[in-house]
Image (tube, rainbow, N blue to C red):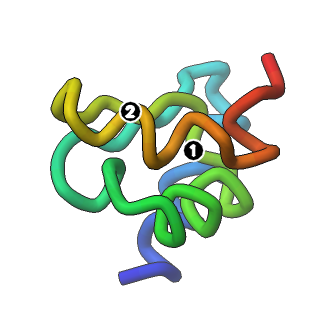
Amino acid sequence: MLDMVAAACAGGDETGKPVGVCGESAGDPYLALVLAGLGVASLSMAPSKVPAVKPCPVAAQP
């Protein structure tokens, strides 16, 4: 699955289209770091998950 996300992000970079992830995966603090490292441009999650993900260093970057 992570290879597919990385491939989608690479394709998004080539075409100028950002890739985002929505759902439980985006709301997991550890997986959010992995997704950001793979090139995911945005994470959409339940409001209750934001406090757990927001302190992540990658999440603070524009």
Q: What's the distance in space between the residues labelled 1 and 2, CA to CA? A: 17 Å
Q: Position of residue 37 (x, y in %)?
A: 73, 60
**54 and 40: which is toward the camera:** 54
Q: Position of residue 26 (x, y in %)?
A: 35, 50
Label 2 secondary element = helix
Quadrant hosting residue 40: top right
Q: Amino acid at mark 2?
A: Val
Q: Residue at x 65, y 51 (%)?
A: 36
Above or below 62: residue 4: below
Label 1 secondary element = loop
**Residue marked by disc 2:** 50
Q: Residue at x 28, y 61 (%)?
A: 25
Above or below 27: residue 25: below
Q: Which of the two discs, 1 and 2, labels the residue nearer the N terminus?
A: 1
**19 and 7: which is toward the camera:** 19
Q: Amino acid at mark 1?
A: Val
Quadrant of the snapshot with the N terminus: bottom left
Q: Position of residue 35 (x, y in %)?
A: 55, 59
**Residue marked by disc 1:** 40
Q: Residue at x 79, y 17 (%)?
A: 62
Quadrant hosting residue 4: bottom left
Q: Position of residue 45 (x, y in %)?
A: 25, 35
**In the image, is 48 to the left or to the right of 50?**
left
Q: Which mark is residue 28?
A: none
Above or below 60: residue 26: below
**47 and 41: which is toward the camera:** 47
Tag in front: 1 or 2: 2
Q: Residues within 10 Å of mark 2 (few under 14, many from 20)?
A: some
